[in-house]
C-alpha cells in the first residue's frame, strides 16, 4: 500500500498537508507519526522523504514494495538509506501471521489481546537489516521469479518468504474503527423487522466481540458462545455438541474453526447458526465471506443481503441476492460492485423498511392488476364465443384491443407504483410491518387464484349481462360491454388505492377523458346516436355496478372483520395524536 502525499502551498500561512491512502488505517498511522514529530513530506514511486523534529530530512530510496493481500495478511517494503546506504526490509501485518515471523518475545501476544479487547485493529511491525550480498541475491531471485512463465505468483511468494524470517520486532499499533452515527438503533430496528444479522470481519476474535457488544449487535445481557479454536475434526464435533446444548445465545467463531466446520459439518453448522439471534465470524477471508453467504442462500432459501465498505467485501456482495455498498474511507470498491450504494449505515433502515417494503407491495399489486387486466378481457371473449357456438368471431377488433392495453387502462394500472399504505414515519416507528412481508401474503398462490376468480366473475358478468340486454345490433353490445369493461378496470384501481397521489388522479381522469373522446371519434366501432340514449347509459351503469359492487361490499366487510395491521396502526396513531392535542 502506498500513501499518496499532497502538499498545498498557501503563502504566507503555514502549509497544510493532507494524506491519501488505500486504507484509512494508513492515514491514521502517518498522521500519528506527524503528531509526534516525524512527518512524511514527500512520497513517490522511488523515494520517501521524512522530516525529523529537528528539521533535518531522512531520505530513502524505495527498492521493492510487496503489497498487502488478503491471503498473506501482510505487506512489506525494502528501502535504502541515502546517508548510510543501509538496506532495511520493513514488514507489517496481522498478529496471527507476524507472531511466527518476528523474533521470540514474551509480551506480543498479551499486548495484542489487550488492544483487541478495547476494540482496536492490531498490526505488528518488524524489520530486518540486509547486507549488500543478501539484497543482491534476493533481487536476482525475485526478478527471475517475476519473469517466470508458469506459476509466477507461487514462485514470487516463495522468494519473498525467504526474507520473512527472524525479524526484529519494532512495535504494535492499534487503530480504533469508530462506529458511524446511529449504528445501534439501526441494528435494533433490523432485529425488530425480523432480519437476522451476521457480522463477517477480518478482525481478531476479541476485537470482533468488542465491536459486536459496542454496536449492540449482541446485547449486554445476552449470552455469548465462543467457538474454541479447533484443529481437528473431533475437536470441531465436540464444540458443535457443546453449542447444540445452548439456546438463544450469540455465536462467535474464528475463521480457522469456521473453515473446518464448513468442510466437515457444513449443514449441521449452518442449521445451528441460523437459530442464533446473532453470529460473529472473525478472521474471515473474502473467500470465507462469500462461502457463508452462498450457504445461507442455499440452506434457508431466503434472500440474503450483504453489506460492506471495502474491497475485501466485494466477493461477499456479489454472492448475495442483494448487495449494499458503503462509500467511506475504505474506498468505493464495495459501492461499485453493489446493487445499491449508500453513504451511511443508518440509511439501511429507510432503504429496507420503507423503500423495500413499498417496492414489494407495489410490485405485487402491479403484477396482479396486469394479470387481471389481460384475463378479464380473455374471459369475455371466451364467454362470447361459447354463447355463439364457438364461432371464430372477435369481440373487439383493431383499435379497441390496442387502446384497452395502452391509453385506456395503462396509466391507472401503472400509477399503483405510487401507492402507500403508511407514511415513512410509521414504517420506521413500527418495523414489525416489514416482518409481515416474510409471510408472503401480498403475492402468493392464494392471491393469484383470488384475482383469477375476480377476473372470471367480472368478465362473465359483463359479457352475460351485455348479451342479456342485447336489443338490435351487435355494435350496441360492443359499445355497452367495452365501456363497462373500461369503467370496471378504472374502478378496480380506485378501490385498490390506499393513499391518493396527484398523478393517480391525473391518470384516472386522463384515461376517462381519452376514452370519452374515442367514443366520438371511432365511429366504425361505436354508434354515436346510441351513445346519447338513456338505454346505453343505464345499461352501462347497471353492468358496471353488478361487476364491482359485490366485490366492494365483500372488501369492506372483510376489512371490518379482519383489518390489516397497518390500518390498526394508523387508527392508534390518530388516537394518540388526538389525546396529545387534548392534553396540551
Image: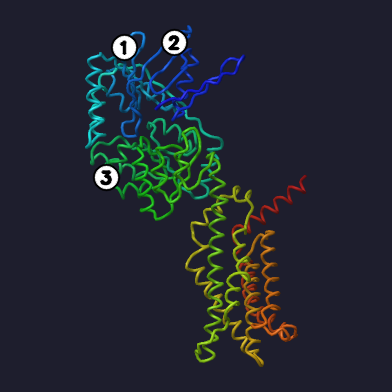
CB contact under 8 Å: marks 3 and 1: no
Residue 340, above or below 137: below
Q: Is residue 262 at least partly visible in the picture? A: yes
Q: Quadrant of the N terminus?
A: top left
> Can you name the residue that lies furthest to the top here?
54
Residue 283, above or below 8: below
Query: Does label 2 or label 3 sit earlier along the sequence?
Result: 2
Query: Around disc 2, counting alpha carbons within 10 Å, would you say few (fewer than 14), some (14 to 19), or many (20 or more)?
Result: some
Kindly report the distance in space between the C-alpha atoms of the residues bearing marks 2 and 3: 54 Å
Q: Where residue 256 sits in the image (x, y, percent)?
A: 30, 37
* Residue 209 picture quarter: top left
* 3 vs 1, front mark: 1
Kindly report the distance in space between the C-alpha atoms of the residues bearing marks 2 and 1: 16 Å
Residue 271, above or below 412: above
Q: Where residue 320 sits in the image (x, y, percent)?
A: 41, 49
Q: Where residue 495 sits in the image (x, y, percent)?
A: 64, 68
Depth check, front residue: 437 or 2: 2
Query: Around disc 3, counting alpha carbons within 10 Å, would you say few (fewer than 14), some (14 to 19), or many (20 or more)?
Result: few
Q: Quadrant of the C terminus?
A: top right
Residue 46, above or below 73: above
* Residue 551 picture quarter: bottom right
Q: Residue under circle 3?
A: 263
Q: Residue at x 49, y 59 (%)?
A: 439
The numbered dot on residue 86 is: 1
Looking at the rendered structure, the secondary structure element under dot 3 is: helix
* Residue 460 picture quarter: bottom right
Q: Is residue 479 at least partly visible in the picture? A: no
Looking at the rendered structure, the secondary structure element under dot 2 is: strand
Looking at the rendered structure, the secondary structure element under dot 1 is: loop
Q: Residue under circle 2?
A: 57
Amino acid at each position: 500500500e502506498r500513501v499518496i502525499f499532497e502538499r498545498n502551498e498557501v503563502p504566507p500561512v503555514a502549509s497544510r498537508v493532507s494524506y491519501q491512502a488505500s486504507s484509512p488505517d494508513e492515514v491514521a498511522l502517518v498522521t500519528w507519526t506527524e503528531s509526534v514529530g516525524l512527518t512524511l513530506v514527500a512520497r513517490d514511486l522511488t523515494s520517501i522523504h521524512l522530516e525529523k523534529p529537528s528539521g533535518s530530512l531522512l531520505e530513502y530510496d524505495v527498492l521493492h514494495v510487496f503489497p498487502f493481500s488478503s491471503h498473506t495478511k501482510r505487506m512489506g517494503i525494502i528501502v535504502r538509506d541515502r546517508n548510510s546506504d543501509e538496506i532495511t526490509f520493513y514488514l507489517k501485518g496481522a498478529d496471527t501471521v507476524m507472531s511466527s515471523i518476528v523474533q521470540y518475545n514474551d509480551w506480543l501476544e498479551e499486548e495484542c489481546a489487550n488492544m483487541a479487547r478495547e476494540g482496536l485493529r492490531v498490526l505488528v511491525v518488524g524489520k530486518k537489516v540486509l547486507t549488500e550480498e543478501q539484497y543482491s541475491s534476493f533481487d536476482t531471485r525475485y526478478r527471475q521469479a517475476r519473469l517466470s512463465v508458469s506459476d509466477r505468483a507461487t514462485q514470487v511468494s516463495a522468494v519473498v518468504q525467504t526474507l520473512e524470517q527472524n525479524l526484529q520486532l519494532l512495535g504494535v499499533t492499534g487503530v480504533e474503527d469508530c462506529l458511524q452515527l446511529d449504528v445501534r438503533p439501526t441494528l435494533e430496528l433490523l432485529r425488530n423487522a425480523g432480519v437476522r444479522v451476521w457480522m463477517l470481519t477480518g478482525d481478531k476474535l476479541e476485537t470482533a466481540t468488542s465491536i459486536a457488544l459496542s454496536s449492540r449487535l449482541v446485547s449486554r445481557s445476552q449470552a455469548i458462545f465462543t467457538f474454541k479454536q479447533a484443529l481437528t475434526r473431533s475437536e470441531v464435533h465436540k464444540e458443535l455438541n457443546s453449542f447444540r446444548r445452548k439456546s438463544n445465545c450469540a455465536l462467535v467463531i474464528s475463521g480457522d474453526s469456521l473453515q473446518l466446520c464448513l468442510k466437515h459439518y457444513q449443514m449441521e453448522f449452518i442449521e445451528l447458526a441460523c437459530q442464533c439471534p446473532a453470529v460473529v465470524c472473525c478472521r474471515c477471508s473474502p473467500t470465507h465471506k462469500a462461502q457463508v453467504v452462498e450457504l445461507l442462500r442455499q440452506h434457508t432459501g431466503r434472500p440474503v443481503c450483504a453489506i460492506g465498505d471495502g474491497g475485501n467485501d466485494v466477493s461477499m456482495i456479489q454472492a448475495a441476492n442483494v448487495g449494499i455498498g458503503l462509500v467511506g474511507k475504505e474506498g468505493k470498491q464495495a459501492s461499485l460492485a453493489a446493487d445499491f450504494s449508500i453513504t451511511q449505515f443508518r440509511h439501511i433502515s429507510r432503504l429496507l423498511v420503507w423503500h423495500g417494503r413499498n417496492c414489494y407491495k407495489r410490485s405485487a399489486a402491479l403484477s396482479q392488476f396486469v394479470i387481471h387486466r389481460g384475463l378479464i378481457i380473455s374471459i369475455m371473449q371466451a364467454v362470447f364465443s361459447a354463447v355463439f357456438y364457438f364461432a371464430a368471431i372477435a369481440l373487439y377488433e383493431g383499435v379497441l384491443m390496442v387502446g384497452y392495453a395502452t391509453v385506456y387502462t395503462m396509466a391507472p394500472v401503472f400509477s399503483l407504483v405510487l401507492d402507500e399504505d403508511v407514511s415513512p414515519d410509521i414504517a420506521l416507528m413500527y418495523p414489525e410491518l416489514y416482518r409481515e412481508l416474510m409471510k408472503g401474503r401480498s403475492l402468493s398462490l392464494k392471491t393469484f387464484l383470488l384475482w383469477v376468480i375476480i377476473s372470471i366473475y367480472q368478465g362473465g358478468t359483463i359479457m352475460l349481462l351485455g348479451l342479456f340486454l342485447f336489443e338490435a345490433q351487435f355494435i350496441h353490445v360492443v359499445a355497452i360491454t367495452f365501456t363497462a369493461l373500461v369503467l370496471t378496470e378504472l374502478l378496480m384501481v380506485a378501490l385498490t388505492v390506499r393513499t391518493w397521489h396527484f398523478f393517480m388522479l391525473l391518470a384516472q381522469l386522463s384515461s376517462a377523458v381519452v376514452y370519452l373522446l374515442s367514443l366520438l371519434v371511432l365511429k366504425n366501432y361505436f354508434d354515436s346516436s346510441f351513445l346519447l340514449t338513456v338505454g346505453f347509459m343505464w345499461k352501462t351503469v347497471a353492468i358496471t355496478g353488478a361487476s364491482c359492487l359485490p366485490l366492494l361490499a365483500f372488501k369492506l366487510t372483510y376489512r371490518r372483520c379482519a383489518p390489516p395491521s397497518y390500518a390498526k396502526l394508523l387508527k392508534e396513531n390518530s388516537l394518540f395524536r388526538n389525546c396529545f392535542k387534548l392534553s396540551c
